[in-house]
Image: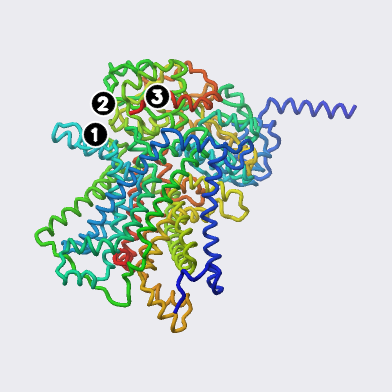
Amino acid sequence: MKKHVVRLALIASLLAAGTTPGLAQGAGPADPKLQASWAFMQKEMPGAPASLLEEACKEGRVMLYHGTWVQAQDAQVKRFQERFPCVKVEKFTADTGQRQERWLAEIRANRHVADIVQDTDPGFLDAQAAAGTLLDYKISNDAAFDEAAKRTGFWYASRVALVGIAWNTDLVSEEEAKKLLRWEGIIDPVWKGRAAVVDPAAGGVAYLPWYIWLKQFGPDFLQKIGDLKPRIVSAIVPASASLASGDIAVLFNASETGLLPLLDRGAPIRWSLPEPGIGPMTGQAIARFAPHPNAAKLFQEYAFTEEGYGIWQKLGGAPARRGFQDQRPVAKEKWYKVPAVFAPYDRADASLSLQSVMDAYRKLVVRPQ
Amino acid sequence: MTPTRAQQGPFSADWGRLGGFLFLAFLLALVAAPILYVIYGSFRSGAPGAADAGFTLENWRTVYLSAPYLSALWNTVALSAIVSMLALLLGGALAWLVGRTDMPGRNQMALLLVVPLLISNLITTLAWIALAAPNAGFLNAWFRSMTGMRTLFDIYSFQGVVLVHVLHFASFAYLALFAALRSIDASLEEASYMLGVGPVRTGLRMTLPLIAPTLATSFLIIFVLVAENFSVPTLLGSPVGFHTLPSLIYQNMAVTPAHPTLAAAAGTMLLWVALIGAAIQRRVTRNASRYVTVTGKGNRFRLVRLGRWRFAALGFVALYLFLAVVLPYFALMLGSFMSFLTANIRPGVFTLENYATILVGDNLEPVLNSLLLSAGGGLALTILYLGMSFFLEQTSKGFARLVDYVTMLPSAIPALILGVGLIWTFVGWSVPIYGTMAILLIAYFLRNLGYGLRQANNAFSQIARELTEAARMTGASRLRALWDISIPLIRPAILSLWTMLFIFIFMEVSATILLYTPDTRTMPTVLWNYMSSGSQPHAFAIAVAQATLVFVVLYLADRRFGLLRKTLER
């Protein structure tokens, strides 16, 4: 009888734990210095145990391999360290290809440095999950992400890097700009000699629109882009800078990543995000052999809380978290509209089609001189 | 008599020579390892060590048999040859005017002509885009407002690529040629003049052959540095369809997933270019003793009187400084105070925020790291290159020739690929190199090896052998002769090498960006990350701070030790 009572009490407490976040995470940490951190965890990371905090603090540091969205990352890291002063965040920043190669080389050599890795290519993260280099850790806010914005346990999307058509408002009239609300508008002859495109060889956000255009509209669309003799720019950032300075009037495959900092500083630019929307996710994952696994889990948890996500998203890009209020000032602009429908695409196929897309681009857009 | 180098094998003499050989062997292994890794990687379907990667010839087939790569190779060679030639002509003219004529203001100009080297190629390119972008460059906008015509100069062109390179490397050529022109034994030219030969014929028949080794070495170094540069052709050439090998390599590393093995195969093409260049340079400089100019005697040379052309010469030098320093610096300064770059200048676009952002405590560590690596690392590399050169002198000709070729290779491989090669090599080592400052120093050692060793060789080759032989005959050991005779004589050359390495290391970013850690961030990595994040004005602010800092350090060193003057007067 006594045994049954104990068992029932245990089940009752487990059930209660399932509904009450505070109890779900067990007793709080013994160290009084961790109480503030623990209170935050109870509020924003339902289900994360106190032991995670204690173990993370014992590890004391976490290494983040992140992309070149320095301001967004710095802001998030700063707040994380205020919330969890016992964990020091270290960062390595580089462009995607270089960051990938360094991380993979370290894995191959069994020298594990990175705890958290970010990538603008979800296909790459999927491949790494399949290869066993990512840790399977389901965050407590997992349910807040749709299937397209995560691979449960392995990676979660920090943002959608939206691609659109951007123009300089000093050089393009409002009447002309109406043509740019649809993808088909970019092949209008009015843009001849005034437009630029980012070379798909720049990868990531610059590449995806070429892949989708070819699938959606066929080679003729690329041919017509080529007829406009657009200036070819080697990367997103200089292309955005050229647009802001007025050196080019229109940028056909513009990324919000490059445009937002310029808009915030008052550059005379606008952009449309035509449907079907194009926007690869930027994902974040924990390395399977992270040298600081608990600190990494804690950071991963924090990055996808309302607070952590909001801080990053405000500077980093459109939210990928379901129902999340876009924190960016641009979201309040009347002209700004996020597409309701996105172009479906197979992430693996997009990676595999790189060469054929490049071939079509060179033949139809660049054209041998 | 001291035995000649030809009579000595690498193992043939004393312990000192054996130690020297081991020292050289160690350094050569350091050079060879990442290069071999790159070559090995170019024959793999995936990066070395990847589980599913195997042997393949596909990368080589793609690179060596496909039109885009062959065309890029041709573009690379043509661009490098044109730039090297023009930079030497311009740098030579500047060096002659400042170093060997009575041009007014030559002492002041002598120092100012070093300034173009204090701004990295990448930043100079961005500054020139701000100046001469066809529709919105500051210069073109000004020209349009003055004349109503559309464009004064379009920087997005082959000419633009050449202009940016030549303005930068002319300063490099100037430094080398100034020193060479000033170190020529004056009695030779005096004899020529006394025989009634005019200055032009004397210059062509005597001066030019005397500085031929410096010309050949400078040509090779500039050629290789232009060939491996990716930022200038990628930013300025790609928009008009002009691609070089480094711009294709950059693309292979930028796409996702990256293609490092294909990039490695493309990198091997530049190795052949460097080897051929090194062979030509060796041919030109094979009789180094013909160019001995530092003897036991003093050296006074006659300044050429320019007469009524004095001020025209000053105007020519000032024009170069205007194009290479004033204009880009103006663009950088202006841009660093703007919210975003625009030719539509109005009060609202100016801000101090860029400087406020970079002058935070967090950015102090990269400044200190840069200073430490440049000053301390530069000194360490100077000693290494001099040591290599000294020990090479003791080895057989065949071994020296091998080393001469091998040491050119790391400078020829684009830094992006060299960085990958270094990771592949050192990431698995248990010796604490990877993730420390040591790997950055190794990268800098390799990047500057072609230049550093040749400069060290040039320094030693200019000392008359009889000076050290005299010391040997009085019983001094080789090391003693080196310390008592050679080092004091080449002290200016040592300071010159250290100064140049200080500048090069302070500016290096392409390899550093792949190898740094949070503890070893440098100023250029901070600059690069701002730029990649879309914040060019922040990057400009750092570039201004960086160039100013380097100049201040060099200026103070010059005041205290005469560093720049000795660099120029070596």
In the depicted view, which residue is nearer to us: B263 or B353?
B263
Q: Residue furthest left?
A: B308
Three-letter amino acid code of the residue under disc 3: Lys
Q: Estimate how packed mark 1 is, as few (under 14), some (14 to 19) or many (20 or more) residues with alpha carbons within 10 Å.
A: few
Percent of width and height locating residue A47 = 66, 31
> How many angstroms separate mark 2 from mark 1 (CA)?
10 Å
State the CA–CA distance, disc 3 to disc 2: 33 Å
How far from the left and from the top, in percent, is residue B555?
Answer: 31, 61
Q: Where is residue B330 shown, x and y percent of the image? A: 25, 46
Label 3 with label 2: CB-CB less than 8 Å: no
Write down the chain letter for disc 1. Answer: B
Disc number at residue A170? 2
At which x and y percent is residue B452?
41, 59
- Which residue is painted at 47% across and 83% down in the image? B475
Q: Are the residues flagged by discs 2 and 1 from a single subunit?
A: no
Q: Which residue is mark 1?
A: B344
Q: Residues within 10 Å of mark 3 (few under 14, many from 20)?
A: some
Q: Is residue B436 visible?
A: yes
The reply, left or right, for residue B492 in relation to residue A57 is left
Would you say the residues marked 2 and 1 are in contact, meaning their CB atoms lie under 8 Å apart? yes
Say if A107 sits above or below B91 in the image.
above
Q: Are marks 3 and 1 on the same chain?
A: no
Numbered circle sitting on residue A363? 3
Q: Quadrant location of the C terminus of chain A?
A: top left
Looking at the rendered structure, the kind of residue marked 2 is Asp
Q: Nearer the viewer, residue A186 or B309?
A: B309
Circle number at residue B307: none
Foreground pick, B177 / B105: B177
The amino acid type of the residue labelled 1 equals Asn
Check the residue under mark 2 and report the chain it is in: A
Q: Residue furthest front?
A: B7
Q: Is residue A184 above or below residue B465?
A: above
